[in-house]
Amino acid sequence: MARFPNPQMNLNNRDGNRSKG
């Protein structure tokens, strides 16, 4: 999640969203 502070902004990155969610 460090590399993706905002999962919403990274729509292309599904993994980032899952990590935060």
Image (spheres, grey):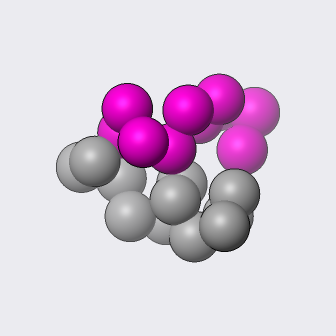
Q: Which residue occupies the extreme right position in the image?
A: 2
Q: How many marks?
A: 0
Name the residue: 66% across, 67% down.
21
Majority secondary structure in the magenta region: loop
Specify whether 17 is left or right of 10.
right
Q: In which quarter of the image is the N terminus?
A: top right
Name the residue: 52% across, 59% down.
17
Q: Which residue occupies the extreme left position in the image?
A: 12
Q: Is residue 4 magenta?
A: yes
Relative to 14, is 7 above or below? above
Splitting the image into 4 quarters, where does residue 18 fall? bottom right
Specify whether 11 is left or right of 5.
left
Relative to 16, is 6 above or below? above
Relative to 5, is 14 above or below? below
Q: Does the magenta stretch include residue 6?
A: yes
Name the residue: 65% across, 29% down.
5
Name the residue: 38% across, 64% down.
14
| Magenta residues (range) | 1-10
Residue 13 locus on image (x, y percent): 36, 53
Splitting the image into 4 quarters, where does residue 19 fall? bottom right
